[in-house]
Image (tube, rainbow, N blue to C red):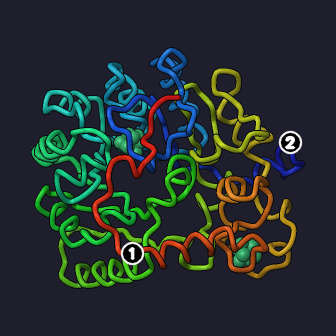
């Protein structure tokens, strides 16, 4: 038996259930990272969803099959109602991880969140030391992060550290891993910069050399052999000639809900102008997942043209990242330029070549970056 047809004629039962929700509860943040994954046009506080809206989103997400969520921002601790939001997720049976810069995380606040049902915490740090971390964050935040790490460790909640890697901190990777172990993180996500939005705007300042990446890869292999925190490391697509199956394929695993209720298959998809994303204020998450044009736009392989159409990897990487295709070519339906078979591959290959030619990085001046600020 097949279910009701969706906007694309696909039977509803043919769709996988989403299992993850990225809940961007605010775009406000005391930091200004030049690679921030928030859109260039940040949502104002006055447009944010209410506590009740988020409770409904979590209940609908759970009904759809979502089992885990990242409660993120911006800085989610800037929402005074964060315990109520976490409690709503907990009531719905959704695992919640707080994704935080650490600024504003006191023992009392974390106790309140744990009492509300928070399951784990991911803390970000920008470099292994105060000077580098504060430079990249565009704010004096390292001391707050040190204190936050103490608070998280003392809470006993599972603790992950997230570090976005680029030209100006890759050479400090041994010290970054040592910092994570010293702070008590059980897992360290070494997230090579993805060049969308703010990071694309700062690409010239952030692109690493291949030598830096090769040294970092060797460091990760050596540290894994020595034990210690779990290390998550993926080579960046710019340097592999092969795109990533972004988000496990468009509209296949995950839903992002932004601060104003905009629902997207991927946080970077804000930038695709003709997507007309639905909003949870107007439609249920079930309708958004199964029926909306935005979630169906690049699902599966039917939308593909050459060279993806007919390529043996099309069910593996789904043609790569739609947001990267749009950001670099102006057409979200083109093959991801990270792929060496893409006719647009020079849009990735040339800047990588320039980064490789550039001298080994010295500590940059703040003027090297366009920091993330509301426009
Ligand atoms: S990447 Fe930096 S600026 Fe962006 S939300 Fe996270 S801490 Fe804030
Ligand atoms: S041509 Fe398309 S499907 Fe084939 S490897 Fe490149 S991006 Fe993937």
Q: Is residue 333 left or right of residue 353?
A: right
Q: Which residue is mark 2?
A: 7
Position in image of residue 145 (x %, y %): 19, 44
Q: Is residue 208 left or right of residue 4?
A: left
Find numbered disc 2 in the image and state the secondary structure of the residue it sits on: loop
Disc 2 under 8 Å from ligand 2? The reply is no
Residue drawn at point x = 62 percent, y = 73 percent? 350
Q: Which residue is mark 1?
A: 359
Position in image of residue 4 (x %, y %): 85, 42
Cα distance in 3D space between marks 2 and 1: 52 Å
Residue drawn at point x = 65 percent, y = 34 percent? 285
User: Alpha-carbon neighbours of circle 1 within 10 Å: few (<14), some, or many (≥20)?
Assistant: few
Q: Quadrant of residue 281?
A: top right
- The numbered mark, 2 or 1, whose residue comes first in the sequence reads 2
Residue 318 seen by the camera = no
Q: Which quarter of the frame holds ligand 2?
A: bottom right
Position in image of residue 155 (x %, y %): 14, 42
Position in image of residue 190 (x %, y %): 35, 64
Residue 115 seen by the camera = yes
């Amino acid at each position: 038996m097949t279910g009701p047809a969706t906007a694309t004629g696909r039977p509803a039962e043919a769709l996988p259930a989403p299992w993850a929700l990225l809940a961007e509860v605010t775009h406000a943040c005391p930091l200004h990272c030049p690679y921030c994954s928030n859109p260039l046009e940040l949502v104002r506080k006055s447009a944010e969803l209410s506590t009740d809206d988020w409770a409904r989103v979590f209940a609908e997400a759970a009904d759809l099959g979502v089992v885990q969520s990242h409660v993120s921002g911006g800085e989610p601790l800037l929402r005074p109602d964060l315990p109520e939001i976490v409690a709503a997720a907990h009531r719905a049976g959704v695992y919640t991880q707080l994704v935080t810069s650490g600024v504003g995380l006191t023992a009392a606040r974390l106790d309140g969140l744990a009492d509300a049902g928070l399951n784990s915490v991911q803390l970000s740090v920008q470099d292994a030391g105060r000077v580098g971390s504060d430079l990249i964050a565009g704010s004096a935040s390292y001391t707050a992060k040190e204190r936050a790490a103490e608070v998280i460790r003392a809470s006993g909640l599972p603790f992950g550290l997230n570090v976005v890697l680029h030209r100006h901190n890759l050479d400090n990777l041994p010290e970054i891993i040592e910092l994570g172990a010293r702070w008590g993180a059980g897992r360290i996500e070494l997230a090579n910069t993805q060049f969308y939005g703010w990071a694309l705007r700062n690409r010239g300042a952030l692109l690493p050399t291949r030598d830096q990446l090769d040294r970092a890869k060797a460091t990760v292999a050596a540290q894994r052999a020595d034990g210690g925190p779990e290390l998550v490391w993926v080579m960046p697509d710019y340097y592999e000639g092969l795109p990533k199956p972004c988000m496990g394929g468009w509209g296949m695993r995950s839903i992002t809900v932004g601060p104003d209720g905009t629902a997207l298959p991927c946080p970077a998809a804000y930038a695709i102008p003709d997507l007309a994303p639905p909003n949870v204020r107007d439609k249920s998450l079930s309708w958004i997942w199964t029926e909306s044009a935005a979630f169906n736009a690049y699902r599966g392989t039917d939308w593909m043209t050459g060279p993806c159409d007919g390529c043996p990897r099309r069910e593996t990487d789904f043609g790569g990242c739609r947001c990267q295709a749009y950001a670099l070519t102006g057409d979200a339906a083109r093959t991801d330029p990270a792929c060496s078979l893409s006719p647009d591959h020079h849009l990735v290959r040339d800047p990588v070549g320039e980064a490789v030619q550039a001298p080994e990085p010295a500590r940059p001046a703040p003027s090297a970056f366009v920091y993330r600020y509301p426009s």
